[in-house]
Image: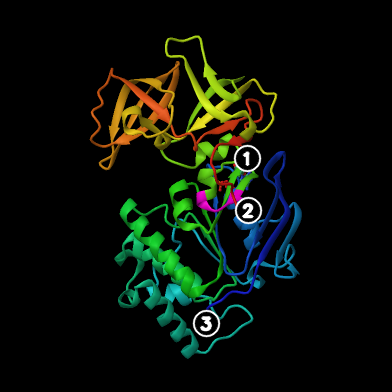
């Protein structure tokens, strides 16, 4: 069994049209050999369709798909050396775990000896921790164990490309977390070029070297999890990544005393936030924008050490204790705002809290397009 895949993938303008519906719209993506890439996006955004086109289960309407130097658009699925694992484990109920893993393995052009197959099963079973379960039938296995068998089935085929379509979706939260860690380890051991699809942003953030955010069949951003969180390219990515979701407030942009301000007027709790010196600000003639600030980047004023903070006054409507922190929901200038505070902060419904923004954690989005035009962070994305 190889431990390194040497198959990079290249998706060039990949498009899938179902009659009048464009499910996947001209996707460009380069995946390095042995890389683990996660595709994340809401239901219906085209994740499975993309995966199925890579596997060869779905025709590509337009664009080119390369495995290494080979264009594989017209290569049959069985000749692509791809293995796919789905959310519903798809094990044969009348076969033991072992037989499920090896079923059909000699059906292709390659033939393996019994010994080779046996060794591959032992290797995969050890990696997956299912050595003692190989003679059980699927109905004698837990959900997590069945999913490991399904993974084992994929791994012993020594695929160049491993495609995982929401493989943990049917597992309970604790098992899902455990399996995520294991998948990481398994990937390091087997090293296949892996594409993992999920609608769950937490899963995407914890698993991917790189994460592809997809919406409406189009790539929104491809970056490391941290870069997606720190430097979202548009409102969609900002809202999709991070929990609780980012606060987005319509504001006016004004210039005074060499500084730029985000202002909101016309309500009792007007605010005016100093965004920094005009010279640090990209030249813009915008007078309106959407201010993005994450709930964890707002703090109670008395807890902060920022210079000259401009407080925002939030009226508390509900609180959500999370054990290690608390999310407070309320309104600022008629806009719903969430703030993450210390679990033991003394906050009650009806209170007015005085909050300040971390000046290095502000994002500004174009009102019309939703594209970001300013991040206040000191460090730039790499
Ligand atoms: P996701 O995996 O992100 O939930 P899919 O790739 O399954 O999304 O679907 C993308 C879009 O394509 C959806 O609007 C879905 O309804 C549509 N779609 C998927 N398969 C077919 C099909 N066989 N025929 C017509 N439309 C389809």
Looking at the rendered structure, the secondary structure element under dot 2 is helix
The image shows residue 270 at horizontal and vertical percentages of 46, 14
The image shows residue 332 at horizontal and vertical percentages of 42, 19
Q: Residues within 10 Å of mark 1 (few under 14, many from 20)?
A: some
Taking depth in this image into account, of 290 and 100 the one nearest to the observer is 290
- Residue 183 occupies which quadrant of the picture? bottom left
Give the label on residue 32, or none. none
Residue 223 magenta: yes
Labelled pair 3, 1 in contact (Cβ < 8 Å): no
Residue 231 magenta: no
Q: How many marks?
A: 3
Looking at marks 3 and 1 on the same chain, the residue that comes earlier in the sequence is marked by 3
Residue, disc 1: 216
Does label 2 point to a residue whose CB lies under 8 Å from ligand 1?
A: yes
Looking at the rendered structure, the secondary structure element under dot 3 is loop
Taking depth in this image into account, of 154 and 188 the one nearest to the observer is 188
Taking depth in this image into account, of 349 and 183 the one nearest to the observer is 349
Labelled pair 3, 2 in contact (Cβ < 8 Å): no
The image shows residue 177 at horizontal and vertical percentages of 36, 56
Q: Residue at x 49, y 73 (%)?
A: 155
Residue, disc 2: 50
| Separation of residues labelled 3 and 1 (CA atoms) | 38 Å
In this view, 332 is above or below 326:
above
Q: Is residue 93 visible?
A: no
Looking at the rendered structure, the secondary structure element under dot 1 is loop
């Amino acid at each position: 069994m190889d431990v390194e895949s040497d198959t990079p993938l290249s998706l060039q303008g990949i498009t899938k049209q179902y009659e009048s519906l464009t499910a996947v719209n001209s996707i460009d993506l380069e995946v390095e050999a042995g890389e683990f890439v996660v595709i994340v996006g809401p239901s219906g955004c085209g994740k499975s369709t993309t995966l199925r086109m890579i596997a060869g289960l779905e025709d590509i309407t337009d664009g080119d798909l390369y495995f290494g130097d080979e264009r594989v658009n017209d290569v049959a699925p069985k000749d692509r050396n791809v293995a796919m694992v789905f959310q519903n484990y798809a094990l044969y109920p009348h076969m033991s775990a072992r037989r499920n893993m090896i079923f059909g393995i000699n059906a292709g052009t390659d033939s393996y000896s019994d010994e080779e197959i046996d060794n591959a099963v032992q290797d995969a079973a050890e990696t997956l921790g299912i050595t003692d379960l190989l003679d059980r039938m699927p109905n004698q296995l837990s959900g997590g164990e069945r999913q490991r068998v399904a993974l084992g089935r994929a791994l012993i085929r020594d695929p160049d490309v491993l495609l995982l379509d929401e493989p943990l979706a049917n597992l309970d939260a604790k098992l899902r977390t455990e399996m995520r860690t294991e998948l990481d380890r398994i990937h390091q051991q087997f090293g296949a070029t892996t594409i993992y699809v999920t609608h769950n942003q937490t899963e995407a953030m914890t698993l991917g070297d790189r994460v592809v955010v997809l919406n409406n069949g189009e790539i929104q951003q491809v970056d490391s999890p941290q870069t997606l969180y720190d430097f979202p390219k548009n409102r969609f990515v900002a809202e999709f990544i991070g929990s609780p979701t980012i606060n987005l407030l319509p504001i006016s942009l004004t210039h005074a005393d060499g500084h730029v301000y985000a202002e909101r007027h016309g309500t009792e709790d007007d605010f005016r936030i100093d965004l920094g010196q005009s010279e640090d600000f990209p030249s813009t003639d915008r007078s309106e924008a959407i201010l993005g600030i994450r709930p964890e980047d707002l703090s109670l004023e008395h807890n902060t050490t920022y210079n000259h903070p401009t407080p925002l006054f939030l009226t508390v409507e509900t609180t959500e204790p999370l054990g290690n922190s608390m999310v407070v929901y309320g309104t600022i200038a008629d806009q719903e705002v969430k703030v993450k505070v210390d679990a033991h902060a003394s906050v009650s419904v009806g209170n007015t809290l005085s909050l300040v923004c971390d000046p290095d954690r502000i994002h500004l989005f174009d009102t019309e397009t939703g594209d970001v035009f300013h991040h206040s962070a000191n460090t730039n994305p790499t």
